[in-house]
């Protein structure tokens, strides 16, 4: 059951999508929702269907006080590691907010301070707080859209279905056709090639 973190403070929730993928960016979103925001469908994006996320994303964007979405691409992921790339994507998303939040709540248990804004990490926060759930939906939909576009250029890897995750078909395509500039060269299953 989702709830508000704090009705008195201006809260930004942030989350990422695509950490465990073999290809494509890690994508993060940051969202500040109005205090009275409610939508019965809103939940952790992993619990929603693609159709539900597609319905929710424009509603969140329209209703949000502010939001930001950012990608961090494989060449950066390979250089700084996936955890730091995920945090960088969150920082870039927070930087896009038109309103400065009074506190940041972060899905997960790791974060680097952003400016001097207080923050709190929340394990499974996307299933606990509205702002993080909204960020999870925006991150996931933005990343999926990007992977659908990439699929047009590299159809052999079926990114329109696996979104870059390490499915059997994706692994087989890597073994058969090699890797693309969009693969993460430091990841198991890619670096072996």
Image: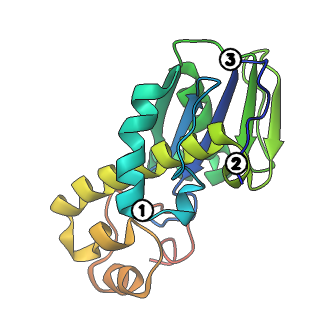
Location of mark 3 (residue): 101
Q: Residue at x 51, y 53 (%)?
A: 41
Mark 3 or mark 1, which is nearer the start of the sequence? 1
Q: Residue at x 28, y 67 (%)?
A: 160
| Depth order, front residue of 120/171 | 120
Assign the C terminus to one quadrant of the image.
bottom left
Location of mark 1 (residue): 23
**Left or right: 176 with respect to 165?**
left
Residue 87 seen in this snapshot: no
Residue 36 seen in this snapshot: yes
For marks 1 and 2, give the CA distance.
31 Å
Please say if 42 is above or below 94: below
Q: How crowded is mark 2: few (under 14 residues within 10 Å), some or many (20 or more)?
A: some
Q: What secondary structure is found at the residue carrying circle 2?
A: loop
For marks 1 and 3, give the CA distance.
32 Å
Q: Residue at x 65, y 41 (%)?
A: 130
Q: Where is residue 143 in the image (x, y as percent from the top left)?
A: 40, 50
Q: How crowded is mark 1: few (under 14 residues within 10 Å), some or many (20 or more)?
A: many
Dot 3 and dot 2 residues touching (CB under 8 Å): no
Q: Position of residue 72 (x, y in %)?
A: 48, 41
Q: What secondary structure is found at the residue carrying circle 3?
A: loop
Mark 2 or mark 1, which is nearer the start of the sequence? 2
Q: Where is residue 66 in the image (x, y as percent from the top left)?
A: 51, 21
Res 110 quadrant in image: top right
């Amino acid at each position: 059951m989702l709830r508000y973190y704090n009705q008195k403070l201006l809260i930004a929730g942030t989350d990422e999508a695509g950490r465990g993928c073999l290809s494509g960016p890690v994508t993060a979103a940051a969202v500040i929702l109005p205090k009275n925001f409610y939508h019965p469908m809103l939940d952790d994006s992993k619990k929603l269907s693609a159709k539900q996320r597609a319905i929710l994303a424009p509603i969140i964007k329209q209703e949000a006080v502010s939001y930001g979405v950012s990608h961090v691409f494989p060449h950066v992921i390979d250089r700084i590691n996936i955890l730091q790339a995920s945090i960088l994507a969150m920082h870039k998303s927070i930087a896009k907010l038109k309103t400065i939040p009074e506190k940041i709540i972060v899905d997960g248990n790791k974060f680097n301070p952003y400016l001097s804004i207080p923050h709190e990490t929340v394990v499974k926060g996307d299933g606990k707080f509205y702002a993080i759930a909204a960020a999870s939906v925006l991150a996931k939909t933005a990343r999926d859209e990007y992977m659908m576009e990439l699929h047009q250029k590299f159809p052999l890897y079926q990114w329109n279905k696996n979104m870059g995750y390490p499915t059997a078909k994706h692994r087989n395509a890597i073994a058969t056709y090699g890797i693309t500039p969009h693969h993460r060269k430091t990841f198991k299953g890619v670096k072996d090639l």
